[in-house]
């Protein structure tokens, strides 16, 4: 029995989460595990009604859960940053979800904007540090609103934070057992203090993993190679900001936001899984959004919980559905409704 905290969130979040839970319930009857869900209404609507974003009492409840399943955060009537910082970042920091795990995988039948590239070429994972860097929000402004305004925001990297991220990436590359190659994505030629720490840590920890090939790529070069030669990558490890950027590029080359899912991982605690698309408020309640990203997030959650067989069954079903003629693309123009996509995956389990 797994206790799952469900945060449907804003916009299309409740619709895609509904389909993800539908798939989990169906596969659980096949493999024999059970789930108990607790649903929380944190998001834009609650904030507008009560002024409350995410109370500390909820964080304590989440600590007792086996995982968190999130839909989407973002409301058109709430200023940007309030919900993102108050929910997403607060969860990551308070629950110490120090790894952001982003598979970049092109399934057969899914269109990619990269000419002459296919599923054999686009299959890698980005391990992003998730609780340090620029996202700590350390900084401030001086003379705000004047021509002499100064804005500062500091990038914070600790040896502990960098090392545990790098070590997780080496372990992941080893367990993934594909090319057994780990690439450090940094900007050590410019960020000479922060990324010197990353390079030294990468080299030192790497000595403990003689079976893993080590590679280095500056972040600008990483972006170029992800487009030109994505097959060069197996696992990429990088800092918070660069990870945020290259994973969106990764989403595009794997077919778009409609398939991209991620996990916010605390290997020793509670982890959270989510589609990486936004709340898309203009499509709310129309049953047109493709929920594959949310279903993929559910599949990642099952794997993290140790339900390897169930995770494999769900991923196989996703691949089968995407390879059929029913799914022309992953956009709202696919011709398949949100609920129909969930039903298709269930029927292919």
Image (spheres, rainbow, N blue to C red):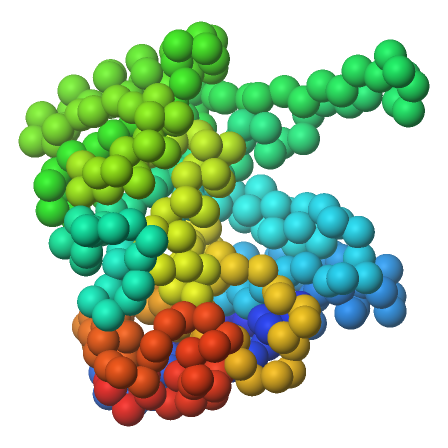
Q: Residue at x 64, y 60 (%)?
A: 73
Residue at 54 percent across and 27 percent down: it is 133
Please say whether residue 156 is visible from this viewpoint. yes
Q: Position of residue 32 (x, y in %)?
A: 26, 84
Question: In the image, residue 78 lies at what x, y percent?
Answer: 80, 57
Picture coordinates of residue 127, whole percent (x, y):
35, 40
Q: For the view shown, which residue lies furthest in the front direction? A: 115
Q: Which of 68/282 is in front?
A: 282
Seen from the viewer's position, the closer of residues 102 and 110 is 110
Q: Is residue 274 left or right of residue 235?
A: right
Q: Which quadrant of the view contains residue 71?
A: bottom right
Name above or below for residue 211 compared with residue 198.
Answer: below
Using residue 87 as the reference point, say whether residue 274 is left or right of it: left
**Residue in the image at 68% along x and 71% along y:** 282
**Quadrant the N terminus occupies:** bottom left
Q: Examine the rendered structure and indicate whether residue 128 appears above or below residue 118.
A: above
Drawn side of residue 38 relative to residue 172, left or right: right
Q: Residue at x 54, y 65 (%)?
A: 70
Q: Is residue 273 visible?
A: no
Q: Is residue 209 above or below residue 347?
A: above
Instruction: State the residue in front, 333 or 2.
Output: 333
User: Could you say which is closer to the camera, residue 181 or residue 65?
Assistant: 181
> Residue 106, image x and y in percent?
26, 59
């Amino acid at each position: 029995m797994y206790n799952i905290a469900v945060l449907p969130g804003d916009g299309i979040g409740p619709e895609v989460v509904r389909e993800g839970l539908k798939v989990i319930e169906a596969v659980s009857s096949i493999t024999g595990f059970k789930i108990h869900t607790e649903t929380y209404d944190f998001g834009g609507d609650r904030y507008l009604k009560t002024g409350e974003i995410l109370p500390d009492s909820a964080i304590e409840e989440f600590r007792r859960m086996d995982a968190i399943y999130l839909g989407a955060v973002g409301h058109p009537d709430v200023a940007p940053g309030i919900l993102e910082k108050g929910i997403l970042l607060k969860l990551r920091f308070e629950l110490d979800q120090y790894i952001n795990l982003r598979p970049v995988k092109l399934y057969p039948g899914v269109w990619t904007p990269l000419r002459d590239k296919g599923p054999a070429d686009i299959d890698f994972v980005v391990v992003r540090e998730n609780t340090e860097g620029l996202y700590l929000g350390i900084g401030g402004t001086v003379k705000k609103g004047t021509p002499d305004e100064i804005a500062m925001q500091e990038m914070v990297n600790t040896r502990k934070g960098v090392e545990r991220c790098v070590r997780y990436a080496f372990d992941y590359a080893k367990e993934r057992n594909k090319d057994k190659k780990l690439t450090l994505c940094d900007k050590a030629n410019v960020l000479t203090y922060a990324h010197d720490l990353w390079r030294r840590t990468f080299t030192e920890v790497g000595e403990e993993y003689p079976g893993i090939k080590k590679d280095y790529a500056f972040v600008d070069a990483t972006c170029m190679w992800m487009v030109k030669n994505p097959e060069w990558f197996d696992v990429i490890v990088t800092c918070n900001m660069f990870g945020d950027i290259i994973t969106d590029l990764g989403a595009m080359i794997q077919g778009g936001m409609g398939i991209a899912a991620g996990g916010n991982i605390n290997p020793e605690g509670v982890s959270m899984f989510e589609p990486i698309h936004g709340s898309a408020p203009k499509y709310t309640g129309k049953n047109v959004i493709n929920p594959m990203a949310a279903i993929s997030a559910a599949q990642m959650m099952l794997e993290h919980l140790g339900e390897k067989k169930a995770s494999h069954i769900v991923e196989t079903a996703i691949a089968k559905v995407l390879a059929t003629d029913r799914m022309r693309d992953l956009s709202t123009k696919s011709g398949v409704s949100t609920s129909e996509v969930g039903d298709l995956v269930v029927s292919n389990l």
